């Protein structure tokens, strides 16, 4: 079949197998060309939420930067004869195939990482294949969670707090129009559900399960990813339902750190920079902020894409013996370049001025769109998108990679 992008709102309902493989290949090559990590820095790495964005980048840096054995977990849609898989499914298959060619152990478990059944599968795989884990990366991004203990299905909400409707600037990415959006405040139930889905409880469950089975190495590390952003996005992000969940992640970090003390281990929350992802595209206001931010950061030459950012995290903050850049809440701050005074001052100036007619002048909406399409395997010059491809996937030797 000929596979083209089909965009519905903030998601793309198709993915291109060759394009996804090219995206993985591109990131692998970037990591291999940097060469700042040492083999043995990380031996066995578990990535929860491994199929895209920062989770996939973490797996690539661990595997191809430090030659680590990597076990990944993600819930992805498989392909059929007439429908493509999710992009993450193709990403996982491509990663495993590229790792195999390099002689690296890489296995992916496709299932609900919130469930006890998948936790048990992971435990058995570690026992059979790996041995104690040196690093656990927690990078799950899901709108829903079926609680493994209560069997209650929780759905997250992206809403402000308080009792007033929030009016903010945003952008219609498809039309390229700057608009005003009205956001209703969250109820207490919506706040609680969001914390249940995106907070730190599941991270705690994972570390407790691994520790109970003696599957964490001496001096092990675990890191969970978060985003704080700037005051422009705080009303819908940090000061909203998402912020409440992220604060619960901080609570979990303290509890996990205490539980790992007898292993000489540590838990950190890493605050990362804004990127284009399926999750960020769904948050009102954020795409406009990201478009302005990327243009400014590219102009001052301190922009990092996803793989560069995670490589810097591993090489400067997670590498054994690294001096970590911590804030008052013991979070690793990787958003230092995004939040420089010069960058934020200019972004705020443009935020006040930007309108539909000046969007191209002040922001990089085209760059946002290009990054968004690449998530799903589209927009790579080395891929022939007019070629008839099998949605069930090709062998890596058949991928037209550049």
Image (cartoon, rainbow, N blue to C red):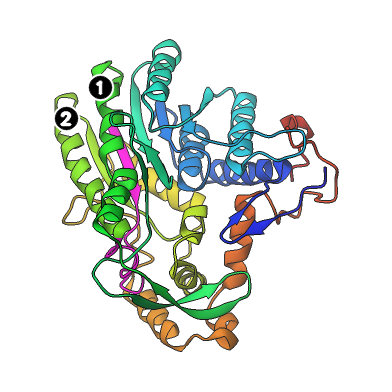
Rendered image: mark on residue 331: none
Q: Give the range drawn in magenta.
A: 220-240
Mark 1 nearby-residue class (10 Å; few <14, some 14–19, many ≥20): some
Q: Which of marks 2 and 1 precedes in the sequence?
A: 1
- Is 144 on the left or on the right of 257, as rendered? right
* Residue at mark 2: 259
Chief secondary structure of the magenta span?
Answer: loop
Q: Are marks 1 and 2 in contact (CB under 8 Å)?
A: yes
Q: Work out whether residue 168 or residue 152 is closer to the camera in this orientation and state it.
A: 152
Residue sitting at x 62%, y 41%: 86
Q: Which residue is most to the top? A: 128
Question: Quick check: is 287 in the magenta stretch?
Answer: no
Please, what secondary structure does the residue beneath circle 1 have?
helix
The quarter of the rendered structure image containing the N terminus is top right
Magenta-colored stretch includes residue 227: yes
Question: Is 362 situated above or below 142?
Answer: below
């Amino acid at each position: 079949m000929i596979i083209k992008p089909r965009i519905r709102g903030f998601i793309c309902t198709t993915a291109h197998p060759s394009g996804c493989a090219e995206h993985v290949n591109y990131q692998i090559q970037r990591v291999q060309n940097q060469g700042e990590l040492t083999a043995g820095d990380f031996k066995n790495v578990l990535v929860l939420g491994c199929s895209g964005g920062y989770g996939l980048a973490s797996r690539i840096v661990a595997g191809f930067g430090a030659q680590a054995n990597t076990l990944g977990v993600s819930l992805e849609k498989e392909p059929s004869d007439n429908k493509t898989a999710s992009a993450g499914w193709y990403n996982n298959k491509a990663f495993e195939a590229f790792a195999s060619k390099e002689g690296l152990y890489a296995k992916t478990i496709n299932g609900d990482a919130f469930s006890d059944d998948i936790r048990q599968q992971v435990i058995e795989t570690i026992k059979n294949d790996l041995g104690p884990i040196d690093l656990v990366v927690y990078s799950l991004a899901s709108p829903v969670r079926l609680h493994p203990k209560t069997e209650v299905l929780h759905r997250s909400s992206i809403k402000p707090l308080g009792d007033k409707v929030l009016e903010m600037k945003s952008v219609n990415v498809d039309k390229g129009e700057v608009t005003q959006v009205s956001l209703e405040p969250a109820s207490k139930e919506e706040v609680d559900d969001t914390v249940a889905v995106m907070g730190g409880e599941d991270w705690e469950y994972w570390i407790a399960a691994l520790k109970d089975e003696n599957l964490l190495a001496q001096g092990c590390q675990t890191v969970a990813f978060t985003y704080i952003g700037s005051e422009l996005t705080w009303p819908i992000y940090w000061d909203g339902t998402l912020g409440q969940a992220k604060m619960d992640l901080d609570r979990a970090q303290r509890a996990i750190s205490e539980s790992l003390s007898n292993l000489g281990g540590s838990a950190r929350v890493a605050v990362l920079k804004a990127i284009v992802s399926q999750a960020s595209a769904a948050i009102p206001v954020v795409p406009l902020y990201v478009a302005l931010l990327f243009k400014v950061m590219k102009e001052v030459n301190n922009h990092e894409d996803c793989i560069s950012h995670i490589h810097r995290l591993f090489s400067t903050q997670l590498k054994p013996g690294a001096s970590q850049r911590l804030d008052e809440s013991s979070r690793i701050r990787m958003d230092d370049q995004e939040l420089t005074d010069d960058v934020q001052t200019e972004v705020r100036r443009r935020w006040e001025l930007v309108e539909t007619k000046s969007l191209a002048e002040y922001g990089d909406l085209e760059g946002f769109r290009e990054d968004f399409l690449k998530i799903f395997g589209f927009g790579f010059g080395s891929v022939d998108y007019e070629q008839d491809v099998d949605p069930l996937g090709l062998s890596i030797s058949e991928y037209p990679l550049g």
